[in-house]
Amino acid sequence: MDGPVRSRPASLSDFQFGAVATETIEDALLHLVQQNEQAIQEAAGRMGSFRETRIVEFVFLLSEQWCLEKSVSYQAVEILERFMIKQAENMYRQATIQLREKKEPQNWKALKEQLFNKFILRLVSCVQLASKLSFHYKIISNITVLNFLQSLGYVHTKEELLESELDVLKSLNFQINLPTPLAYVEMLLEVLGYNGCLVPATRLHATCLTLLDLVYLLREPIYESLLRASIENPIPSQLQGEKFVSVKEDFMLLAVGIIAASAFIQNHECWSQVVGHLQSITGIALESIAEFSYAILTHSVGANTPRRQQPVLPHLEARALRAAASSNT
């Protein structure tokens, strides 16, 4: 992706708050809460395995080069994550059936190579599909995609590009309008504005975007620090790590952490008020919000951040995590 880096879409700086009726906001917030609870319940041990830093960075840079909205970047990462998980599950299911029926096993090395060789194509297809969800702004054309792939040494036809999009759509049952953390952040900022937050939502929004990028890029170290804090142990067990996956898939928790960290950066004197509002809106414990914002800030601005005062993440089964540690010894 050589060449000059283009500026971000002007629509980010023009983001408007306070233009939606309160009844609509309440309904939308309730819908997000329900989606979040479902995602947490469905979280599996392998979730998040395709949100690696290099993959996320590639998607972010590509979206920036194509002047796409930030929402498209997050949407593309989530579509790719779900699609690759489906691919892995299908391969596992095929292997299980073959073992049970004692059939000749497939050439898994060839399948792996095929998956690897098509990964960039799939990734770009996910970005293109995500751009189509925000069609009010900009859609990436097939010519643009093919030229980009060719610049990387991948030669594909329009037919292959369309087949790749269709493969992603079919694999996800055409359900690609997935929730992203940005939707939760913007919804909570909207509510904060109505609740009389001392820090303007527009100021918080810009900082939230930067910190959300950071969390996506530093996902593992940030969540590892949260895990260690929740179990009060520097070396988590495998079982504890698996149980902690539900925390990683909690977009509401991520959103309140992002907003709280942004509030501290913008005006640390108003931090307590913002955190109080977030606790009132979401029901997430103050200690949990403080801990997440602390983890984000220590990985971004370093020292002079709000310190935790007691064990954290109580609403995220910290006791269960410690119980798992006891049963694992």
Image: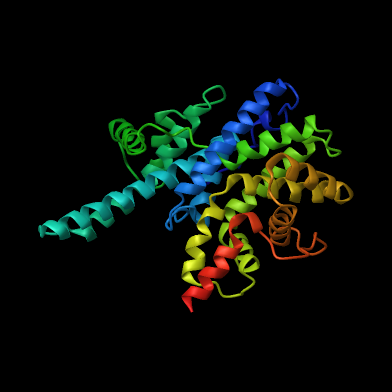
Q: Residue furthest bottom?
A: 329
Q: Choose top left, top right, bottom left or bottom right for residue 323.
A: bottom right
Q: Would you say 287 lies left or right of 318 here?
A: right
Q: Residue furthest right?
A: 269
Q: Is residue 145 something that shows in the picture? A: yes
Residue 144 at x, y percent in the picture = 44, 32
- Residue at 51% x, 69% y is 324
In front of the other: 321 or 252: 321
- Relative side of 139 to 204, left or right: left
Taking 315 as reference, is 33 above or below it? above
Q: Position of residue 303 (x, y in %)?
A: 79, 64
Task: In the rendered view, tell whether residue 218 sits above or below residue 133.
Answer: below
Q: Nearer the viewer, residue 35 or 225?
A: 35
Image spot of residue 21 (x, y percent): 71, 20
Residue at horizontal 42 percent and vertical 40 percent from the top: 124
Query: With respect to residue 221, does 232 lie above or below?
Result: below
Eyeballing the image, is 250 above or below 32? below
Left or right: 61, with 126 as reference point: right
Which residue sits at x=50%, y=72%? 237
**What percent of the width, then of the height, locates residue 257?**
69, 50
Colouring rule applied to residues: rainbow
Count of numbered tags: 0
Residue 73 shown left or right of residue 153 in the figure: right
Residue at 54% in and 43% down: 37
Q: Is residue 117 visible?
A: no
